Image (cartoon, rainbow, N blue to C red):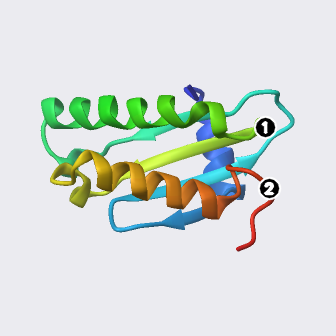
């Protein structure tokens, strides 16, 4: 997981962004041998219980997708308010689509 403020700043400044009604994904190519993730759940999503539940859901989806992801990416996942009411299948579909469009799955990005 990404935790350093410098890593967040680098993704915000130089990373590519892909959006969906449920999520925003920012990605930045790195020279590392792993793909690192960061999650952002702002206060406008709800109280601490709601935000923690969303983080657990996001981590579980990312954990299930991890074997099929390319190495060498920093990924920032930003939750949008619609995610609070979304079901698991919608979350998985949104994440898969965004990471695919960003080029984190398979070959290089085509967008």
Task: Write the residue at 69% across / 33% down.
Answer: 35
Query: Looking at the picture, how far across and down is residue 20, in whole percent?
Result: 41, 67
The quadrant of the picture occupied by the C terminus is bottom right
Q: Is residue 48 left or right of residue 14?
A: left
Compared with residue 43, is residue 13 higher up or lower down, i.e. above or below? below
Q: Is residue 53 left or right of residue 58?
A: left
Q: Which residue is mark 1?
A: 72
**Which residue occupies the foreground of this view, 97 or 31?**
97
Task: Write the residue at 22% across / 60% down.
Answer: 82
Going from N to C along the chain, the mark reached first, 2 or 1, is 1
| Tag 2–tag 1 contact (CB < 8 Å) | no
Query: Looking at the picture, how far across and down is residue 12, in whole percent?
Result: 60, 53
In front: label 2 or label 1: 2
Query: Looking at the picture, how far across and down is residue 73, in whole percent?
Result: 72, 41
Give the Cα separation between the discs numbered 2 and 1.
Answer: 13 Å
**Which residue occupies the foreground of this view, 8 or 28?**
28
Compared with residue 24, is residue 2 higher up or lower down, i.e. above or below? above
* SS type, badge 2: loop
Compared with residue 55, is residue 85 higher up or lower down, i.e. above or below? below
Instruction: Give the label on residue 107, or none.
Output: 2
Q: Quadrant of residue 5?
A: top right
**Which residue occupies the foreground of this view, 85 or 92?**
92
Task: Write the residue at 31% across / 50% down.
Answer: 89
Classed neighbour count for the residue bearing mark 1: other residues with Cα under 10 Å, few (<14), some (14–19), many (≥20): some
Q: Quadrant of residue 17?
A: bottom right
Task: Write the residue at 62% across / 58% down.
Answer: 100
Q: Is residue 80 left or right of residue 73?
A: left
């Amino acid at each position: 997981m990404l935790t350093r403020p410098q890593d967040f700043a680098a993704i915000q400044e130089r990373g590519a962004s892909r959006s969906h009604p449920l999520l925003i994904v920012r990605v930045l190519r790195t020279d590392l041998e792993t793909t690192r993730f960061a999650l952002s759940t702002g206060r406008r999503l709800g109280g601490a219980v709601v935000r923690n539940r969303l983080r657990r859901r996001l981590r579980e989806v990312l954990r299930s997708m991890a074997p099929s992801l390319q190495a060498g990416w920093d990924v920032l996942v930003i939750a949008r308010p619609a995610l609070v009411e979304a079901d698991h299948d919608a979350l998985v579909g949104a994440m898969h689509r965004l990471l695919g469009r960003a080029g984190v799955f398979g070959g290089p990005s085509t967008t």
